[in-house]
Image (cartoon, rainbow, N blue to C red):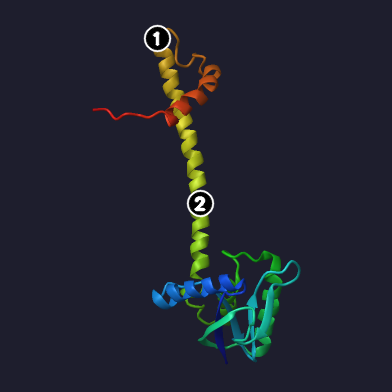
Amino acid sequence: MAKVTLHVYDLTNGSEKTNSTVVHINKIFKNGIGLGGIFHSAVQVYGDEEWSFGFCEEGTGVFSSPSGKNTMFTYRKSLVLGKTNYNIFKVNQILRELSREWPGNSYDLFSKNCNHFCDEFCRRLGVPKPPGWVNRFANVGDIAKEMAANTVSRFRQAKTEIVSACKAAYRFLFCVTNNGKADMDDSPIEEEFPRVQHAWLKNLITNEVNPCH
């Protein structure tokens, strides 16, 4: 059995101003209200190296560095997640598999970052995954992207429904203004509606509508 340790860093690899901002955000959201922050993480098991994941244009994104001493970030703390029952040979096999499965060009800030890698590594080691606060900002971002996509989809659906409703209303008005002589199914709505659709919708949107009293 071997101890599995998670090393957590503040994600401070930008300018001095950016680094200061990240540390301040993490101080408020993690230390102050316990929600989480913007972090880099890596897993240590057997030896003095920690393993993590990052972007690169070619090859694997899995890399190692001295445990707790990654100079690209600001060290925050370490958490013991448990002990793995696998020997070092099995752990090395897992790392080889992950190296093939996690190419550097597949890195995504919200859906496939270093914290997601640590989650998967710990799962394969048979130990609890890192606490939720480590990757909470990425999860929130992923949810925000999904919500944005859903909003676009709903807007398109609403637009289709509005156009259909306008067609039905125009068809009705066309028949009324023609004293009911034209059958609604035979009226030239398909030819006429595109010509007036733009002006009608424009007036509907831009004109001020006074409430009825």
| Three-letter amino acid code of the residue under disc 2 | Ala
Q: Secondary structure at mark 1?
A: loop
Mark drawn on residue 180: 1
- What residue lies at 59% left-to-right and 65% top-to-bottom? 109
| Nearer to us in this view, 213 or 54 | 213
> In the image, what residue occupies the spot 57% across and 78% down?
41
* Residue 209 percent coordinates (x, y): 35, 29
Residue 1 in the image, given as x and y percentages of width and height? 57, 92
Disc 2 crowd, CA 10 A, few/some/many (<14, 14-19, 20+): few
Q: Which residue is mark 2?
A: 148
The quadrant holding residue 4 is: bottom right
> What secondary structure is found at the residue carrying circle 2?
helix
- 50 with respect to 59 (left or right): left
- Alpha carbon of mark 2 to alpha carbon of mark 1: how far? 45 Å
Q: Nearer the viewer, mark 2 or mark 1?
A: 2
Q: Quadrant of the C terminus?
A: top left
Amino acid type at image mark 1: Gly
| Frontmost residue, 101 versus 199 | 199
Identify the mark at residue 151; answer none if there is no mark: none
Q: What crowding class fits label 1: few (fewer than 14 Cα within 10 Å), some (14-19), or many (20 or more)?
A: few
Say which quarter of the image contains residue 206: top left
- Where residue 178 appears, x then y in whole percent? 42, 9
**Vertical position of residue 129 compared to residue 155: above or below:** below
9 relative to 180, above or below = below
- Residue 205 at x, y percent in the picture: 44, 31
